[in-house]
Amino acid sequence: MPDLLMPRLPRVPVAHAASHAPDGVDPLIATAQIIARSPTPVTVANSTAETNLFSQTLTNATSNTIYRFTASGDWLNNSGSAVTYRWRLYLGASNLLLDSGTLSLASSATTGHWNMEGFLYITTTSTQRLSASLVMPPPGGASWQTTSLASISGNAIGTVDMTTHPNLIFSVQLGTAASTSSCSSQAYFIEKIA
């Protein structure tokens, strides 16, 4: 028995719908491809050297290309005093786009976690827009948390020549070298949408 309250809408064949796209507009907006991923941990401990948590070459980046990236990991400061942690995002070896500044993390025997997500928009082959956020809930707790030890976000404009195939780099630097202070990237992926 037909439902009199909810009339059925006519079905439109895909070929018919695509034929109504304005001239010069591709009905297929974009395709996405994972260009890098790694579940292999990268750990920084007992060091104050800036260390890459990931570095990926971006090739064939034309205008209107978008890169989506996500990384997550752990940090521990069981040194007995506060230690600073600093995260940075680069496009190319020396083109700093975002810098968290130094975040002072108190000593705790409990491991903390972090998650970073962002988008890199290639507006032209020589201009970019970056948007990213880093969230660190308080140490401990395996469930959802409504508070955050640190939650930072930022936006930047870059002027990197994408025809040189620069690397997208995410790094961390600890302010104190201690065997009981560490930061690790547990996994990351980078997706190209073009």
Image: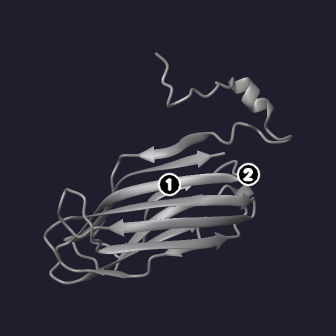
In terms of image quadrants, where is residue 115? Answer: bottom left
Q: How many marks?
A: 2
Task: Using the image, determine if residue 21 lies above or below residue 11.
Answer: below
**Res. 101 in view:** yes
Q: Nearer the viewer, residue 60 or 155?
A: 155
- Outermost residue toward the front? 4
Residue 95 appears in view? no
Badge 1: residue crowd in 10 Å (few <14, some 14–19, many ≥20): many
Residue that numbered label 2 is attached to: 62
What is the three-letter code of the residue carrying label 2? Answer: Thr
| Residue 129 percent coordinates (x, y) | 64, 66
The disc placed on residue 135 is none
Residues 96 and 71: in front is 71
> Relative to residue 12, is residue 31 depicted above or below?
below
Contact between marks 1 and 2 (CB within 8 A): the answer is no
Measured as percent of width and height from the top left, residue 63 is found at 74, 54
Quadrant that contains the C terminus: top right
Q: Is residue 82 left or right of residue 90?
A: left
Residue shown at 32% from the left, 73% from the top: 47
